[in-house]
Image (cartoon, grey):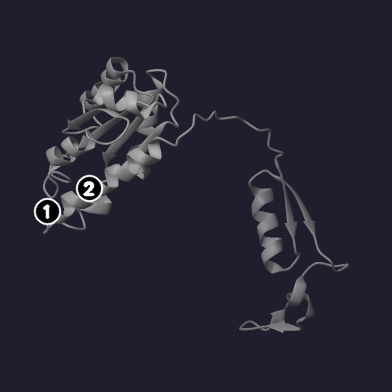
């Protein structure tokens, strides 16, 4: 069934684009990325599946932007490396085309697949297909989100006036914060205040 027919059949208006990254040989060396791309094109709601050599590089990002315009994408799946490394990159990429940055889903084909299944290309490819399928399904459930800013009171409350509480209060105060140190006892010091001497110097604990 052609992609446009699949979209019409879905009936929910979702148009997902999937972008499979070779990451040089980091992924393509262990995964048949073309087979994964071909498979992604058959998934529900997927109207565009593209294979890139380096999706995070400018040419790869430009392909994503062009596909958003050409196919009117409203969800994007990037199957590449760890979101820890490039999720902000791809969020900024789709946001530049007017798409909410939280309508992005990533599948980690590098750390979760190719790097741990280097000696089993068939198995790694099958797993990559599953990861992409899961990511595409999650993408269909994403909703746009807006970031907000909240005022923060530049002060800290430290509960417990023992050694740890006192040191935390000193550190926070040294960093320029107003500190409120509270303890259930009438004096601070905790257990340390009850000791006569401390090892190894045998100095007074107070």
In terms of secondary structure, where does tag 1 sit? helix
Q: Which residue is mark 1?
A: 122
Q: Whole-percent x and y of residue 112?
A: 27, 53
Q: How many marks?
A: 2
Could you tell me which secondary element the residue under label 2 belongs to? helix
Q: Is residue 91 left or right of residue 131?
A: right
Expressed as whole percent of the image width and height from the top left, the position of residue 37 reads 18, 36
Residue 168 appears in the rendering: yes
* Numbered mark located on residue 128 in the image: 2
The front one of 105 and 150 is 105
The image quadrant of residue 19 is top left
Q: Quadrant of residue 32?
A: top left
Binning the other alpha carbons within 10 Å of mark 2 as few (below 14), some (14 to 19) or many (20 upward) gives many
Q: Residue at x 12, y 53 (%)?
A: 122
Taking the image as shown, residue 23 lies to the left or right of residue 137, namely left
Is 178 left, or right, of 66 in this rendering?
Answer: right
Which residue is located at x 28 percent, y 28 percent?
A: 6
**In screen coordinates, is 16 left or right of 202?**
left
Q: Position of residue 115 (x, y in %)?
A: 20, 54
Residue at x 75%, y 82% (from the top left corner): 195
Q: Of marks 1 and 2, which one's residue comes earlier in the chain?
A: 1
Residue density around tag 1, few if under 14, some if 14–19, many if 20 or more, within 10 Å:
few
State whether residue 81 appears in this view.
Answer: no
Q: Can you name the residue that lies furthest to the right here?
A: 186
């Amino acid at each position: 069934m052609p992609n446009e027919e699949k979209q019409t059949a879905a009936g929910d208006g979702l148009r997902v684009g999937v972008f499979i990254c070779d990451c040089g040989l980091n992924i393509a060396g262990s995964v048949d990325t073309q087979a994964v791309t071909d498979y992604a094109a058959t998934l529900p709601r997927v109207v565009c599946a593209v294979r890139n050599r380096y999706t995070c590089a400018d040419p790869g990002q430009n392909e994503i932007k062009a596909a958003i315009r050409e196919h009117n994408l409203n969800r994007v799946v990037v199957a590449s490396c760890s979101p820890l490394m490039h999720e902000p990159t791809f969020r900024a990429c789709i946001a530049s085309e007017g798409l909410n940055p939280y309508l992005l889903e990533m599948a980690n084909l590098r750390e979760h697949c190719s790097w741990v299944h280097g000696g089993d290309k068939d198995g790694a490819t099958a797993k990559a297909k599953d990861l992409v399928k899961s990511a595409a399904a999650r993408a269909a459930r994403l909703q746009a989100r807006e970031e907000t800013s909240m005022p923060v009171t530049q002060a800290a409350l430290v509960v417990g006036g023992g050694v740890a509480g006192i040191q935390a209060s000193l550190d926070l105060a040294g960093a320029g914060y107003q500190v409120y140190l509270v303890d259930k006892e009438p004096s601070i010091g905790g257990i340390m205040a009850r000791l006569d001497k401390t090892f190894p110097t045998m100095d007074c604990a107070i």
